[in-house]
C-alpha cells in the first residue's frame, strides 16, 4: 500500500486553505503539470484529483471550463488538502521547478494608476498638464508581446537597441536605463467571440485569476522609439509573471470600491460592482525594500480595463493576459518604477549603501504582495523575481 501524507500549513502562511493558487510545476525528472500551492507544498492535481485535465503544461485546459468548474475544483482541492494524500501527490515547493502557469494568448498592458500617470507627466512634461486629455476618459493601454512573457525566476539579458542620446541622433548598445514596472496581471479563463464586448458586470464570468507582473522597461530605447506609436522594443524583450495564479474567489475579502472617478466615465465603463482590490505590493531591490505600491489607489478597475479592451468588438481567448500598468501611490516610497523612484534618474535611491538609479548587471528585483484573506489573516500572492545577467 502506498504511503499517505498530510500537509502541514504553518500558522502565518500566506498560502492557507482559503488561498489555493494554481501553477505549473515539474517534479524532479518529471513533466510539467498543474499544481495547487498549500503552505510550502504543491499538490499534483492530476494525481490528487485523478483528473487528466491537470496533466497539462498550462492552466488553459482548466481555465477554459468556466466559473462553475473553477468553484467545484476549488472545493475538491480544499478537501484534498485537508485529507491524507498519496505521497506521490505532494511535493515540497522547494523541490520543484515552476513553469509559466498560463499559455499566454494575447498580452495587453494598461496605464491605470493616476499617481503613476501624473508622476510620468511631471517627469517628461514638467511645464505642461501632467495628464493628457484622454486619461480620465478611458484606460490607456497597448498590445504587448505575449511570446516573451516569462515565469518568475527567469534571468534576463540586458536588451540592446537604439538609445536616445543628448546629441539628437541615437547610438546603439545595451540599455543604460533598464527599469522595472510593478503591476498586477489578470488572466482570462473564458474568452469572448468577435463582436461581443464584455460588460463590466461580466468580469467574474471571464477572468480566472490574478498574478504579479514585472513589465521590464528599457527607458532609453523606449524614449527614442515610442513616438508616435507607443511602446515597442523597449518593452517587448521580457515581461515576468508570477508562477502562481490566485483565483478571483480567494480575493473576495480584498474587493473594495474604486476611488471617485471624475468626470463620470461613459456608460460602458460604469462599474457598479466593486472590483478594485486592496492588494499591498512590495518591491525589493537586491534584498532591500525600496517601495510599497498600493493597488487600492488604482484609478481604473480591472473590470473597466476588460470592458474597454473589448468595447470595439475585439475577441478574447483563454490565456489572454492584461496588466494594470505600473502601480504607484502618492508618496515617494510607493512608486512602482525606478524611473519614478529616482525621478527620471535625477534623485538616486540608496540601495545597500550604494547610490542607484536604474538596474545594474547582477541586480535582482523581487515584487511580492499580500491581501486580506477570506476568513481573516492575509494571503500572499506568488512573487515575481528576476535578475539581470
Ligand atoms: Ca507597463
Image (cartoon, helix red, strand yellow):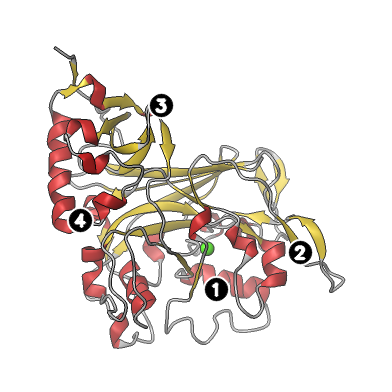
The 10 Å Cα crowd at callout 1, few under 14, some 14 to 19, many 20 or more, is some
* Residue behind label 1 places its C-beta within 8 angstroms of ligand 1: no
Real-space Cα separation, disc 4 to disc 2, in angstroms: 44 Å
The 10 Å Cα crowd at callout 2, few under 14, some 14 to 19, many 20 or more, is many
Instruction: Name the mark on residue 65.
Output: 4
**Which of the two labelled residues, at mark 2 and mark 1, occupies the earlier sequence position?**
1
Asked if 48 appears above or below 180 in the picture, the reply is above
- Quadrant where the N terminus sits is top left
Instruction: Name the mark on residue 107.
Output: none
Dots 4 and 2: beta carbons under 8 Å?
A: no
**Which of the two labelled residues, at mark 1 and mark 4, occupies the earlier sequence position?**
4
Residue most extreme to the right? 167
Which residue, given by chain and number where applicable, does mark 3 sit on?
94
**Which of the two labelled residues, at mark 1 and mark 3, occupies the earlier sequence position?**
3
Q: Give coordinates of residue 321: x percent, y percent.
A: 40, 60
**Which of the two labelled residues, at mark 3 and mark 4, occupies the earlier sequence position?**
4
Nearer to the camera, 51 or 177 = 51
Q: Nearer the viewer, mark 1 or mark 4?
A: 4
Dots 2 and 1: beta carbons under 8 Å?
A: no
Residue under the point 27% across and 68% down: 257
Nearer to the camera, 271 or 71 = 71
Real-space Cα separation, disc 2 to disc 1, in angstroms: 27 Å
Number of numbered tags placed on the structure image: 4
Residue under the point 67% across and 54% down: 178
Q: Nearer the viewer, mark 3 or mark 4?
A: 4
Which residue, given by chain and number where applicable, does mark 1 sit on?
118
Instruction: Name the mark on residue 162.
Output: 2
Q: Give coordinates of residue 152: x percent, y percent.
A: 48, 43
Amino acid at each position: 500500500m502506498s504511503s499517505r501524507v498530510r500537509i502541514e500549513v504553518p500558522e502565518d502562511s500566506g498560502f492557507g486553505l482559503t488561498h489555493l493558487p494554481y501553477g505549473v510545476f515539474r517534479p524532479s525528472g518529471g513533466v510539467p503539470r498543474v499544481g495547487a500551492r498549500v503552505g510550502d507544498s504543491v499538490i499534483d492535481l492530476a494525481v490528487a484529483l485523478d483528473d487528466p485535465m491537470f496533466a497539462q503544461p498550462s492552466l488553459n485546459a482548466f481555465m477554459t471550463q468556466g466559473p462553475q468548474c473553477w468553484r467545484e475544483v476549488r472545493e475538491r482541492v480544499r478537501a484534498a488538502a485537508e485529507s491524507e494524500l498519496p505521497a506521490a501527490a505532494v511535493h515540497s515547493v522547494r523541490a520543484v521547478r515552476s513553469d509559466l502557469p498560463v499559455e499566454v494568448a494575447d498580452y495587453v498592458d494598461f496605464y491605470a494608476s493616476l499617481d503613476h500617470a501624473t508622476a510620468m507627466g511631471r517627469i517628461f512634461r514638467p511645464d505642461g498638464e501632467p495628464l493628457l486629455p484622454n486619461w480620465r476618459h478611458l484606460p490607456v493601454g497597448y498590445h504587448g508581446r505575449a511570446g516573451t512573457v516569462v515565469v518568475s525566476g527567469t534571468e534576463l539579458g540586458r536588451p540592446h537597441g537604439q538609445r536616445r542620446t543628448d546629441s539628437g541622433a541615437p547610438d546603439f548598445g545595451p540599455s543604460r536605463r533598464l527599469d522595472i514596472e510593478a503591476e498586477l496581471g489578470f488572466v482570462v479563463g473564458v474568452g469572448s467571440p468577435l463582436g461581443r464586448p464584455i460588460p463590466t458586470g461580466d468580469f467574474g464570468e471571464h477572468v480566472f485569476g490574478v498574478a504579479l507582473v514585472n513589465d521590464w522597461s528599457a527607458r532609453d530605447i523606449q524614449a527614442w522609439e515610442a513616438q508616435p506609436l507607443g511602446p515597442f522594443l523597449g518593452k517587448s524583450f521580457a515581461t515576468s509573471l508570477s508562477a502562481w495564479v490566485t483565483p478571483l474567489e480567494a480575493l473576495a475579502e480584498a474587493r473594495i470600491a474604486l476611488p471617485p472617478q471624475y468626470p463620470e466615465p461613459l456608460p460602458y465603463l460604469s462599474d457598479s460592482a466593486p472590483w478594485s482590490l486592496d492588494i499591498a505590493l512590495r518591491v525589493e531591490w537586491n534584498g532591500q525594500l525600496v517601495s510599497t505600491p498600493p493597488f487600492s489607489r488604482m484609478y481604473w478597475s480591472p473590470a473597466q480595463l476588460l470592458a474597454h479592451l473589448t468595447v470595439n468588438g475585439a475577441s478574447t481567448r483563454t490565456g489572454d493576459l492584461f496588466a494594470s500598468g505600473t502601480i504607484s501611490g502618492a508618496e515617494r516610497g510607493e512608486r512602482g518604477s525606478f524611473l519614478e523612484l529616482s525621478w527620471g534618474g535625477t534623485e538616486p535611491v540608496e540601495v545597500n549603501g550604494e547610490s542607484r538609479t536604474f538596474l545594474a548587471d547582477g541586480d535582482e528585483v523581487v515584487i511580492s504582495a499580500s491581501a486580506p484573506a477570506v476568513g481573516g489573516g492575509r494571503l500572499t500572492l506568488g512573487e515575481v523575481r528576476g535578475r539581470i545577467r
